[in-house]
Amino acid sequence: MAVRRASHSGSWYSDSAKELNKQLGTWLNNADLSHGPARAIIAPRRVFILGPSHHVRLGGCALSTAVKYHTPLYDLRIDTQVYSDLEASNLFEWMNISVDEDEHSIEMHLPYIAKIMEDYKDSFTIVPVLVGSLSAEKEAVYGRVFSRYLADPQNLFVISSDFCHWGHRFRYTFYERSWGEIHQSVQTLDRMGMDAIESLDPAAFTDYLKKYGNTICGRHPIGVLLQRCCHMLLQQGACDLWRERHGRRDNRSS
């Protein structure tokens, strides 16, 4: 049974369990908890990690062929039952171990998950999913697939993403001078994207991307998240509340 190596440890982060544990403890203790505890604090059964594909062209989403993901702290077990359910939808392909280990987007979250969940390491599983370049329609399809898992409060979703990649290297040099210096322009641009995400409105985030073209690498995993939030609200009969929150009105006659 394949175990995915922590292939970026020793370069992108420490491969020493002692050093990594100390670093993570310091960073987590310094984190702002003004918004209250995350679900991870109350020990979710499963942690879904959706990361963008940086090296392989994917038209959909892919699952790992590994059964465990190694971290310098301890190994994280993949939820084989959820994987079987996802495979049965015929919407997912499989990535081989070399593709899996080349990709960093999922791995970079694993040490944090391992640290936060260290007291529950034998009672939770992970569900890593590599997300390709999806159309808005496909984001909606995958959003519906994941909505039932999001509705379960014992599941936690982690979405991997950076925000603006600015400069000629990334072929992106948008600059709005009225927002200040370049770094202030980038900061404002990213804040606008965050506001669109926090609205939970998939169309607002899509419109933002179309207008500014911001190079958010995790835009498709984020799009899937927004679609499944929207679908979950609709399934729970919260349509009117959701529309009211976002200033929308149903055009149907009463």
Image (cartoon, rainbow, N blue to C red):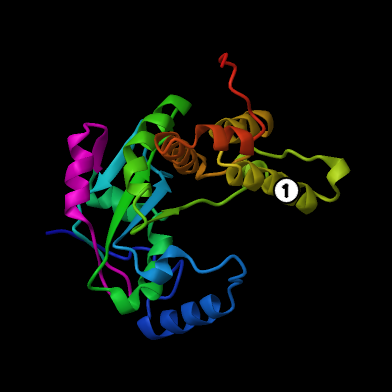
Q: Nearer the viewer, residue 122 or 155?
A: 155
- Residue 22 lies, in percent from the top left, at 46, 84
- Residue 3 lies, in percent from the top left, at 20, 62
- Residue 215 in the figure: left or right of residue 228: right
Residue 203: quarter of image: top right
For numbered disc 1, what is the local secondary structure? Answer: helix
Q: Amino acid at mark 1?
A: Val
In this picture, which residue range is highlighted in magenta?
70-94
Q: Is residue 56 visible?
A: yes
Q: Residue at x 23, y 52 (%)?
A: 97
Compared with residue 118, is residue 228 higher up or lower down, i.e. above or below?
A: above
Q: Residue furthest front?
A: 254
Q: Residue at x 68, y 33 (%)?
A: 212
Quadrant where the image shows the N terminus: bottom left
Q: Nearer the viewer, residue 85 or 22?
A: 85
- Residue 48 in the figure: left or right of residue 26: left
- Residue 200 in the figure: left or right of residue 72: right
Callout 1 crowding tier (Cα within 10 Å): few <14, some 14–19, many ≥20:
many
Compared with residue 45, is residue 167 higher up or lower down, i.e. above or below?
A: above
Q: Residue at x 73, y 51 (%)?
A: 187
Q: Residue at x 43, y 75 (%)?
A: 14
Residue 124: quarter of image: bottom left
Compared with residue 77, is residue 163 higher up or lower down, i.e. above or below?
A: above
Residue 208: quarter of image: top right
Q: Is residue 57 visible?
A: no
Quadrant where the image shows the C terminus: top right
Residue for badge 1 = 186
The answer to if 181 sits in the magenta stretch is no
Q: Residue furthest left?
A: 1
- Residue 131 lies, in percent from the top left, at 38, 41
